[in-house]
Amino acid sequence: MWPGLTVGETAVMSAPKPYTPAQERRGNPFIKYGSKLNTWLYRSTGGRLGASFVGGAAVCLLTTTGRKSGEPRTMPLLYLRDGRDIVVVASKGGYSTHPQWYFNLLADPAVEVTIGREHLEMTARIATAEEKAALWPRLVDNYKYYGTYQARTERDIPVVICSPLG
């Protein structure tokens, strides 16, 4: 029971509010440096550290090629296995813009996915509306905050399917 409610009353939960531009500016360095730390921990321990997130959701490392720099760019992301495919979400916590790694894979869909010590060369593509509709409930079951993130932003959060080469 919620504090202040008596039996028979229900709480009215308000919809998540969009982040303000100032909140996004303050949050971007947290995402950037938190991701760098997570990536370093993951790589240096072969995934023993940094391989799970809130609620136990599994983390992989997704490496894209920087569309401007041509340099490898690695982000720790929650993932879901779907057969041989690895599914990730370009949520950026429900921010108003897509994450940079998403734009990188649009420019070059060749990616590497690291799970533990396993390195997988893959091709990334954006899920169709039908694929997203089928995958989204599983993704939210895996990490319940995806639903909140989508409610917080007006953009359609992309689901990305990484498939093995060949």
Image (tube, rainbow, N blue to C red):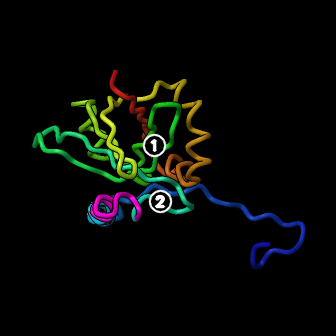
Q: Of the residues shown, which amino acid type is indicated by label 1?
A: Glu
Reply above or below: 40 against 141.
below
Q: Is residue 97 left or right of residue 51?
A: left
C-beta proximity under 8 Å, tags 1 and 2: no
Q: For mark 2, give the secondary structure.
A: loop
Residue that badge 1 annotates: 154
Quarter where residue 15 is shown: bottom right
Residue 43 in the image, given as x and y percentages of width and height: 29, 58
Q: Which residue is mark 2?
A: 52
As drawn, is 14 to the left or to the right of 159? right
Q: Is residue 22 magenta?
A: no
Q: What span is in magenta?
A: 38-48
Q: Is residue 164 depicted above or below 33 in this figure?
A: above
Q: Amino acid at mark 2?
A: Ser
Q: Main secondary structure of the magenta part?
A: helix
Tell me the residue at 23%/38% (across/down). Answer: 104
